Image (cartoon, grey):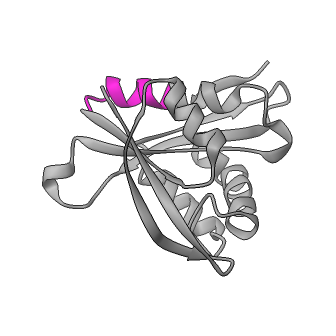
Amino acid sequence: MVQLRLALPSDAEAVREIYNTEVIGSTVTFDMVPRTLDEQRRWLEARSGALAVVVAEDDDGTVVGFSSISPYRDRPAYSTTVEDSVYVRRDQRGKGLGRALLDEIVEVAAKQGFHTVMARIVGHHESSIELHRSIGFEVVGIEKEVGRKFTRWLDVVVMQRML
């Protein structure tokens, strides 16, 4: 049984490991350099108030996935809009963790008083697009070839859910 909870500073290494696997081995994040533990700690700290990180923890207390809400843009007029992220450890996929983490982080965003949640998903990542669609996100645009990683041009599908 997996439990969802708000992330603690002690979760930084587990979150970093899950995230860095995708940095070095996929295009689901446009980051190209793995995060250091200090960077991951700062990232978690920046999401410990209205912004948040939720982790999925298995029976052994191991973090097997996380979701987060982050600022959408840095200008003040965007302050009621957030962007979500969801990452599940590769050996834990297909068990409904992504759905549970996304549901929970959207609920957290609503409770914190945010107005809308945006998702920016690499264009070929159909499972993430369908996951977001399944809980009420709608495609509001496609940014063509805005990223380049592993010598490939990458589109971004922009999805939105009003709260």
- Please tell me whether residue 119 belongs to the stretch shown in magenta: no
The residue that appears at 55% across and 40% down in the rendered structure is 129
Please give the name of the residue rendered at 33% of the width and 25% of the height, measured from the top-left corner: 110
Instruction: Report the magenta residues as a range.
Output: 104-114
Residue 47: in sight, yes or no? yes
Instruction: Determine the main secondary structure of the stretch shown in magenta.
Output: helix
Name the residue rendered at 65%, 64% in the picture: 27
Q: How far across and down, in percent of the image, does residue 127 sit?
A: 66, 40
Q: Where, quadrant-wise, is the C terminus in this rendering?
A: top left
Quadrant where the N terminus lies?
A: top right
Q: Which residue appears farthest toward the left when viewing the image?
A: 77
Rendered location of residue 23, percent (x, y):
67, 66
Residue 106 on the magenta segment: yes
Residue lying furthest bottom in this view?
151
Q: Is residue 69 above or below residue 111?
A: below
31 up-or-down from 22: above or below:
below
Q: Nearer the viewer, residue 31 or 15?
A: 31
Front residue of 8 and 98: 98
Lateral position of residue 163 relative to residue 6, left or right: left
In the rendered picture of this protein, how many numbered marks are placed on residues? Answer: 0
Image point 54% across, 25% down: which residue?
Answer: 134
Residue nearest the observer in this picture, 130 or 14: 130
Percent across and percent down for residue 42 are 49, 61
- For the question of whether residue 7 can be seen, the reply is no
> Which image quarter: residue 98?
top right
Q: Is residue 38 above or below residue 141?
A: below
Q: Position of residue 142 (x, y in %)?
A: 41, 55
Q: Answer with left or right where residue 67 lies relative to residue 64.
A: left
42 left or right of 60?
left
